[in-house]
Amino acid sequence: MISVEEQLKSMKQQMIAKGYKSTVQREATMRVLLEHERDHMSAEDVYMRVKERFPEIGLATVYRTLELLTDLHIVEKMNFGDGVARFDLRSEGHMHMHHHMICSICGEVEEIQDDWLTELEQRVQREYGFDVSDHRLDFIGTFSSCKHGDCRRHCETAS
Amino acid sequence: MISVEEQLKSMKQQMIAKGYKSTVQREATMRVLLEHERDHMSAEDVYMRVKERFPEIGLATVYRTLELLTDLHIVEKMNFGDGVARFDLRSEGHMHMHHHMICSICGEVEEIQDDWLTELEQRVQREYGFDVSDHRLDFIGTFSSCKHGDCRRHCETAS
DNA sequence: TTCTTTATTTAGAATGATTATAATTTAATA
DNA sequence: TATTAAATTATAATCATTCTAAATAAAGAA
């Protein structure tokens, strides 16, 4: 487990290495991402959290930073069909190696921290000559707890 | 293979059965969808095609019709992360049984007309108590033809 | 067929997410 | 420290989508 400071340092190095500058706004944004590793935050969510510590930051800057971090493959940009892009840090090693379960009842997004697709990716390569660099696998359905009214675990944020 | 007229009739019946009305605008929209079964059209695309034959139709109507057809499970609403929702008819029987290959070079979306996920869906059920009703599987990568400069097959619409 | 009710359509305004712009500020480096 | 290019800010613009109010049309009743 690498400390927040070390991860931050590594991210900054990646930026500098590619010719981008390290700024306080970018650092503040990265800090928020590090503290919410698997929260699937929207740009607006990130913006509000960064603003708590750095109130003068602009929304556009957060958008630009998230875009940059996405280009650098430091964050992963996702969208679950609700019209908002969501962002998460890619933990080292597991670039895109996880899937999502999206609950139709409460909207909760839970992760499957695993990569179940290596075999299928080979099949795509074999059968279609398509060279896979990334994938997205989302399951839509319901948690049994939600279906049985006992939604506490997954539905705390339901509207 | 069912004829366009028969499919149209069946869709109208489904509408009526659920208490919705059958209108010329809805029919025109469904016709366009039937003629572009696997084109992954955006609402705007559909609108422009419908407008050719029914110039007085409004964009909002097309949106509303697509939403209605999605609710009725007649069309499938997808999004590939480019900020536009895309729509296709669900062919009978194959509700959600296909996957996508999205080319990073030309942006072309090609389908895998198969369902490779039944086994994984069982696993999600078993390991997470999550009851899957639908899924989405997209592979991002490159077609070998595109990679070798010979992009004719997949890249005709590239920008 | 005509009437009545209610859903639907239209046109345009409104919204919400995201991106672009122009002026100002800041980081990196000479 | 001075220079230069990149980044930030604030705001306007854009794009996809949804809402609104008034007008119209479909389905069923009389």
Image (cartoon, coloured by chain):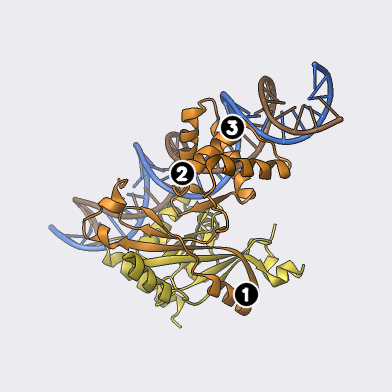
Chain colours: A orange, B yellow, C brown, D blue
The chain identifier of the residue carrying mark 1 reads A
* Label pair 1/3, CB-CB below 8 angstroms: no
Q: Secondary structure at mark 1?
A: helix
Q: Secondary structure at mark 3?
A: helix
Q: Which image quarter is the C terminus of chain A in?
A: top left
Taking the spot 58% from the left edge, 35% from the top edge, the residue there is A27
Question: Where residue A28 appears, x then y in whole percent?
Answer: 55, 34
Relative to A25, A85 lies left or right: left
> Is A98 situated above or below A158?
below
Q: CA distance from mark 1 to mark 3?
A: 41 Å
**In front: B82, or B142?**
B142
Disc assigned to residue A139: none
Q: Which residue is mark 1?
A: A125
Which badge, 2 or 1, is on the more N-terminal residue? Answer: 2
Which label lies toward us, 1 or 3?
A: 3
Q: Mark 1 Cα within 10 Å, few/some/many (few <14, many 20+)?
A: some
**In front: B108, or B99?**
B99
Q: Which residue is mark 3?
A: A25
Q: Secondary structure at mark 2?
A: loop
